[in-house]
Amino acid sequence: MIRARVNGKLWSTRHLDSLPVGALLEVETESGAKLIAFDPLGCAEGESVLVTQGSVAAAYFPNRPVPIDALIIGSIDEVGTSSIGKTKSRESLA
């Protein structure tokens, strides 16, 4: 899994019919790489997310093949640090 932050939504007037309902988002990973990820969750710009890539992303849709290489699988609300017993809110991750 990859931690990333949503930069924005991509808009297209035409796309493949095999794309499921959802949005295509540009996300930036912690290393600074930018990816286009499919978002079935409805994440917003600036939100911290978890992304998976490759066959795992495509396998999320078991009943049909889809042209997806990166999939947002979660929204990060906070990061816990069990060694010191504190948590960091989503806002402090910016």
Image (cartoon, rainbow, N blue to C red):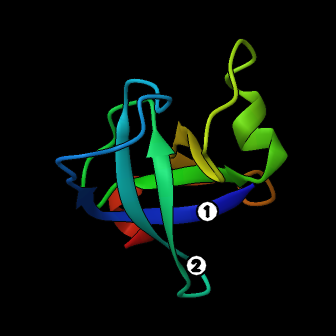
Q: Residue furthest top?
A: 63
* Residue 77 appears in the picture as rendered: no
* Residue 69 appears in the picture as rendered: yes
Q: Residue at x 51, y 46 (%)?
A: 76
Residue 46 placement (x, y as % from top left): 28, 61
User: Label 1's element?
Assistant: strand
Q: Residue at x 56, y 84 (%)?
A: 33
Contact between labelled residues 2 and 1, with CB atoms less than 8 Å apart: yes
Which residue lies under the disc numbered 1?
Answer: 3
Q: Residue furthest bottom?
A: 32
User: Label 2's element?
Assistant: loop
Which residue lies under the disc numbered 2?
Answer: 30
Apparent side of residue 47 relative to residue 52 in the rendered image (left or right): left
Apparent side of residue 37 relative to residue 57 in the rendered image (left or right): left
> Mark 1 and mark 2: span between their CA atoms?
6 Å
Q: Amino acid at mark 2?
A: Glu
